[in-house]
Amino acid sequence: MAPTISVIIPTYYRNDLLPKAIESVLRQNYEPIELIVVDDSGEGHAEPVIQRYDEAEGIIHEENGSWKAALTTGIEASTGEYVQFLDDDDELLEGKLTKTAEVLRENPEVGVSYCGVIRGDERHYPKPSVSGEFLEEALAFQTFPMWTGSTLIERDVLLDCLPLAGMGEDHDLEIELGDTDLKIELARRTRTDYVDECLAVYRQDTNERWAGPRRFEKVKQNVKHQRELYDQYPSIRRKLLCYWHQRQAVYWLEEELWSSKAVSHFFRAAYHANGPTKKLKCGAGAAASLFGRPGWNAAEDFRNALTYGRRQIQS
């Protein structure tokens, strides 16, 4: 008999999308499946939807916790050998569970299998570099399209990762650290392999919690929580922080005509940059941002013109 797969769907006030997620699981050609839906609204908002499906086991949180709290509840309630997470606004495509489970069954040293994903109009296929040992890729935030909805994980490996980051004793961290911290923990314990097909639909949340400064805070919290590991990979930490400070600088220039935050982020990017060339580039960005968005746009136009000129000469 094939190993049981426990599919865990945390949901929070998305009754309009939740049925599509549930039905995408029920359409899978894999057996046996254990389907667990965890309603984290704190008031049973999803209960009417869950009751439509005899195959779904509903768990209703009496109080709103968090995404991580909902996942933990689902993990602890699960009984399958493998665990599949699915956000309530995402979907699994035909063959997802069968094909990722086959990877785990055929490779005993692999504890995480994943597939490519469809996001909007784009197809994102797995990266050959994100196979086998993947700790450095996880620390560098370079594992996509490996994400919670595209992965299938051995439950024993997952249990060893509990408590999920942001819970338990780390009360100084915000509750939501995102799935990168989980991938880092998985990478410390096991290896990965993939199915080279797009078998999941990822509707990336455009909520402001996951964009702009909020997203940057999540990056910094991951670095803080995994600081001992990042101490072993200082080059990855510097490159990561340089990149995100640059992104934040550009974000603030798009939001405001002139921003001291943009100037500050460019200088911090220069501080973290690896090598004189990168430091010079970030320093030039800081200088341009002193003149606000017009200065930055002028510098970008000049840089693009230089790049175009070099390509013309080379051709």
Image (tube, helix red, strand yellow):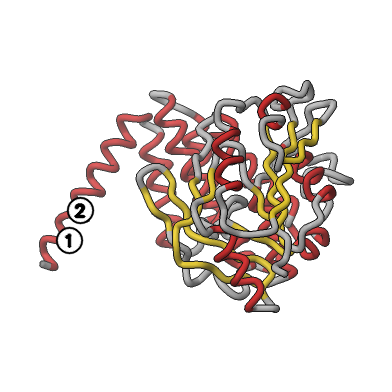
Depth order, front residue of 126/241: 126
Depth order, front residue of 34/145: 34
The answer to whether marks 2 and 1 mark residues whose Cβ atoms lie closer than 8 Å is yes
Q: In which quarter of the image is residue 18?
A: top right
- x, y percent for residue 93: 49, 51
Q: Which quarter of the rendered picture does the C terminus lie within? A: bottom left
Q: In this view, does 272 lie above or below 111?
A: above
Query: In the image, 169: left or right of 312?
Result: right
What secondary structure is found at the residue carrying circle 2?
Answer: helix
- Label 2, residues with CA under 10 Å away: few <14, some 14-19, many ≥20: few
Q: Is residue 194 above or below residue 91?
A: below
Query: In the image, 275: left or right of 185?
Result: left
- x, y percent for residue 292: 38, 29
Query: Could you tell me which residue is drawn at 85 percent across and 40 percent down?
Result: 171
Query: Could you tell me which residue is drawn at 51 percent across and 67 percent down?
Result: 195
- x, y percent for residue 257: 38, 24
Q: Quadrant of residue 193?
A: bottom right
What secondary structure is found at the residue carrying circle 1?
Answer: helix
Depth order, front residue of 51/42: 51
- x, y percent for residue 144: 52, 56
Query: In the image, 135: left or right of 194?
Result: right
Q: Name the residue under label 1.
A: 310
Depth order, front residue of 112/206: 112
Q: Mark 2 points at which residue?
A: 306
The number of numbered discs placed on residues in the rendered structure image is 2
Query: Could you tell me which residue is drawn at 49 percent across and 56 percent down?
Result: 199
| Disc 2 residue type (three-letter) | Leu
Q: Is residue 235 visible?
A: no
Distance of label 2 from label 1 (alpha carbons): 6 Å
Q: Which quarter of the rendered picture does the N terminus lie within? A: bottom right
